[in-house]
């Protein structure tokens, strides 16, 4: 996919957090529903880390964050973006 996919009204994105390769710090202007499909991941927030494992669900309301796999195994994450922007 291209970066233009992020401008769609809504979409699903599956990504894999790879051990030793944390994502860049970023934020979205949307409300995102996140489901950890497999493995364990850490959601790094400005207020501290949140440990998540397979089956955990969270709602991201546009906070600055980063992802990283916890342990030696990759973490698979499904993210659904809503069509309404987060207004804070």
Image: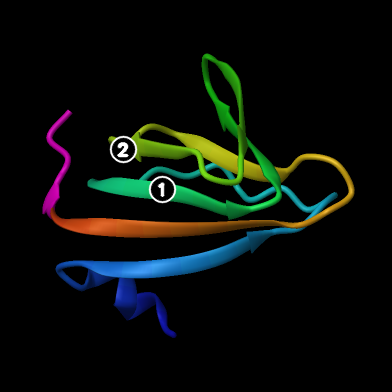
Q: Nearer the viewer, mark 1 or mark 2?
A: 1
Mark 1 or mark 2, earlier in chain: 1
Residues at badges 1 and 2 in contact (C-beta under 8 Å)?
no
Report crowding for label 2: few under 14, some 14 to 19, many 20 or more residues within 10 A (C-alpha).
some
The percent position of residue 11, horizontal first and vertical second, equals 27, 70
Magenta stretch: give its range. Answer: 84-88
Residue ID at (60%, 46%): 54
Q: Which mark is residue 62?
A: 2
The percent position of residue 6, horizontal first and vertical second, equals 31, 69
How far apart are the alpha carbons under marks 1 and 2? 12 Å
In the rendered image of this protein, does residue 87 appear above or below residue 16? above
Task: From the viewer's perspective, tell me whether residue 39 is left or right of residue 29.
Answer: right
Which residue is the extreme one toward the front? Answer: 55
In the rendered image of this protein, does residue 52 appear above or below residue 15? above
The percent position of residue 80, horizontal first and vertical second, equals 32, 59
Identify residue for label 1: 34
Residue 85 falls within the magenta-colored stretch: yes
Residue ID at (44%, 34%): 64
Q: At numbered mark 1, what does the secondary structure look like: helix, strand or loop?
A: strand
Task: From the viewer's perspective, tell me whether residue 15 is left or right of residue 79.
Answer: right
């Amino acid at each position: 996919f291209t970066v233009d996919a992020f401008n769609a009204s809504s979409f699903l994105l599956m990504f894999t957090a790879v051990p030793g390769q944390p994502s860049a710090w970023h934020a979205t202007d949307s409300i995102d529903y996140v489901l950890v499909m497999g493995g364990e991941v850490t959601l790094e927030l400005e207020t501290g880390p949140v440990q998540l494992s397979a089956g955990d669900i969270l709602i991201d309301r546009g906070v600055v964050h980063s992802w990283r796999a916890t342990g030696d195994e990759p973490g698979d994450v499904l993210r659904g973006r809503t069509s309404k922007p987060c207004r804070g």
